[in-house]
Image (spheres, grey):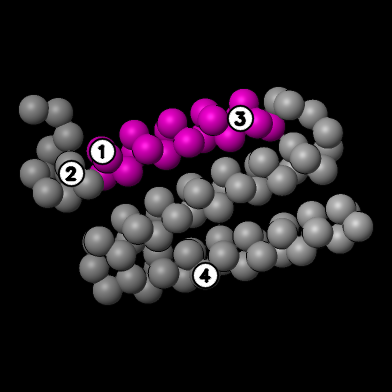
Amino acid sequence: MIAAALYFAFACFGVGLLLCMVRLIAGPDSADRILALDTMVINVIALLVLYGIAEGTQIYFEASMLVAMVGFVSTVAYCRFVLRGDIIE
């Protein structure tokens, strides 16, 4: 039963990742693209956690934490670049 739930969750987050990629490509302005990238990071984190559950190992949970930190920093940097024109003051 848990395998069916994992497959369903993989499919849902995969579809969500594809829809975010469509928004990233066809977004009307940069704010939509920033939100799409941030949502893609969240979907990748979810996929890593699900894969860690499916494989039964803890290394993917640590990888998801690294992706979360890098995703947060990249979102903040991109937002600062859009608002101010440079990242480092």
User: How far apart are the two marked residues, 4 and 2, measured between alpha carbons?
Assistant: 25 Å
Q: Which residue is mark 4?
A: 19
Q: Would you say residue 66 sits in the magenta stretch?
A: yes
Verify CB contact (< 8 Å) between mark 2 and mark 1: yes
Q: Which residue is mark 3?
A: 63
Q: Earlier in the sequence, mark 3 or mark 2?
A: 3
Q: Position of residue 46 (x, y in %)?
A: 61, 48
Q: With respect to residue 71, does 21 lie above or below?
A: below
Q: Residue furthest right?
A: 1
Q: Position of residue 79 (x, y in %)?
A: 22, 47
Q: What's under tag 3, amino acid-wise?
A: Ala
> How would you classify the magenta stretch by its main secondary structure?
helix
Q: Position of residue 71 (x, y in %)?
A: 42, 39
User: Which element carries disc 2, helix, strand or loop?
Assistant: helix
Q: Which residue is mark 2?
A: 81
Q: Earlier in the sequence, mark 4 or mark 2?
A: 4
Rendered residue at 10%/44% (across/down): 85
User: Which element carries disc 4, helix, strand or loop?
Assistant: helix
Q: Which mark is residue 43?
A: none
- Residue stretch in magenta: 60-78
User: How far apart are the two marked residues, 2 and 1, measured between alpha carbons?
Assistant: 6 Å
Q: Which residue is mark 1?
A: 77
Q: Quadrant of the N terminus?
A: bottom right
Q: What's under tag 1, amino acid-wise?
A: Ala
Q: Circle 3: is it few (<14), some (14-19), or many (20+) Cα within 10 Å?
A: some
Q: Residue 4, located in which quarter of the rendered image?
A: bottom right
Q: Earlier in the sequence, mark 4 or mark 3?
A: 4
Q: Earlier in the sequence, mark 4 or mark 1?
A: 4
Verify CB contact (< 8 Å) between mark 4 and mark 1: no
